[in-house]
Image (tube, coloured by chain):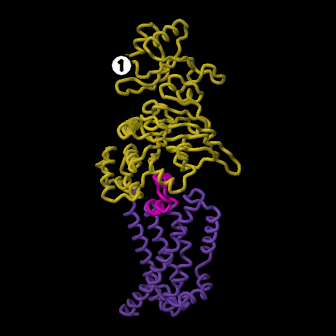
Amino acid sequence: MSGQVLIEVNSLKKVFSDAENRVIALNDINLKVLEGEIYGIVGMSGAGKSTLIRCINRLDTPNEGQILYRGKDILLMDRNELLRTRRKMGMIFQQFNLFMQRTIAENVRYPLEIAGVPRKKADQHVLELLEIVGLTDKANAYPVQLSGGQRQRVGIARALASEPDVLLCDEATSALDPMTTQSILDLLQDINRRLGITILLITHEMAVIRQICHRVAILDGGNVVEEGSVDEVFRNTKSEAGKRLFGVLPEQSSEDPGVPSLRIIFDGASAEKPVISKLSQETGVFVNILSANMNHLQGKMYGQMIIQKPDLEDENKAVIDYLLAQGLTVKEVNKL
Amino acid sequence: MSWDKLIPLILDGLLDTLYMTIPSTALSYLIGMPLGILLVISSKEGIRPMPVFQSILGMTINFLRSIPFIILLVLLFPVTRAVMGKAIGTIPIIFPLVISAFPYVARMVEGAIREVDLGVIEAAQSMGSTDWQVIRKVMIPEALPSLLNGAAICMVTILGYTAMASAAGGGGLGALAITKGLNVGKFDIMYSASLTLVAMVQVMTLLGNQISRKTDHRIK
């Protein structure tokens, strides 16, 4: 990671308004995406994340603010410069948005066609791209003949064709099943590592952020309410929106008190040990697991588990002490 | 009337009908297709929003479409004479046919292009396409099956208009059925000319559907 700022968003504001309604989609967004990183923007639906990513390549025009790409304001670019810059930013979509009347190879070739790359050279490049995404055998098929995951692979190959510096991912895995999501995330991570392409993705799934992002911004009500390294934000969630995204409420929530619980965070430290079984064995307390969201990544456990807080205070303390001794992070929360 | 007299008469009419229908359809598309595309791209959610222009264009097209062909034919006599040299005959009638059909074509094209998924157009834009590239390489190819279906419908409509061409002294099967059939009580001529028209409509529709389906890669 070279650490240079690739995209910088300053005081971005976007208001949708018609005769009756005025909706502030983005209030005052500030963020920096560094070259070579995978930067995730997460938020509930309606948080403004789609609008934000669409402003980055000016598919949507914000009302105020700056979007600097390598120091140049995208919002001030003339038409030609904007088109040139867009070619440096690949984009993939939730609904894939493939050209249905073009074959897979022709889909991937499109960015090269519009850039005037000679046919022979383009075809050669298309083959390489299809190899990266593992679809060489589908070159002459049409999108309708492909599964969702395969379609997104075509979308990725197409977005990579113009050799972009950054890949914008607009809910790229939200229409896919968990297994396919996993394979697409692996592919994105691979692209980031092997080709050094910066990735800016938006999602409503914390799991996506956990798995591949280096840094994260949590978006709520048109504002960035929390930003930082994924580990830091996950371990020490401060914002209300962040806690909601993790499925927990802060302790002193006035409305719904929820179930008193313990949130255990697995960040790869505690490897293969059956922590909960051991916990019961060693402390003599039987715990009730309320929810768990765990992923195996390179032999380590990532994710979180929420267990019901033991009623007796000394039992509770024993459980917490045990978990802390295992190097896990434990928080007392109220489960929604 | 005997077959050897009837058949050349019908063939003659058929050729005249084609002479009127095919160039009229082609010219109507030459004018109507760009207008139809303009209607889409200048609309509020289009790639070049120009709402005022769009609504003026839309209203003009609606106005032209609302005039019945037979009235337009008569109203246009002086213009037709100025443009085509004369107002009456098989070739001059192409002019009012085109004037009457291009607004229809524009709406047909608009409908087909509007079917193209906005997300797909957005994807093309995100890749740095110019507006012209979006139109030529995305909108038209993606809408091709619908455009072809629409073309078949437009052609059939224009074919129907040619049947009224007898009012302007045009030839063709319609004129044959009326002037040499109905008006003089020769019902064999009337029926065979009419049946030939029916057959032409069937062939055009069938062909249109067939080609449309062949070019449609959206179905498995």
Q: Quadrant of residue B78?
A: bottom right
Residue B202 versus residue B76 in the image, above or below:
above
Pointer 1: residues within 10 angstroms few (<14), some, or many (20+)? few
Q: Quadrant of residue A147?
A: top left
Q: Nearer the viewer, residue A31 or A70?
A: A70
Instruction: Look at the magenta stretch and give its main secondary structure.
Output: helix
Viewed as shown, does residue B96 lie left or right of A102? Answer: right
Chain A drawing hue: yellow
What residue is shown with label 1? A272
Residue at x 50% of width, y 70% of height: B33
> Regarding mark 1 in the picture, which secondary structure is present there?
loop
Residue B189 versus residue B55 in the image, above or below:
below
Residue A311 versus residue A218 in the image, above or below:
above
Q: Quadrant of the C terminus of chain A?
A: top right
> Start and end of the magenta stretch?
B114-140
Q: Position of residue A109 (x, y in %)?
A: 37, 55
Q: Position of residue A26 (x, y in %)?
A: 61, 41
Chain B drawing hue: purple
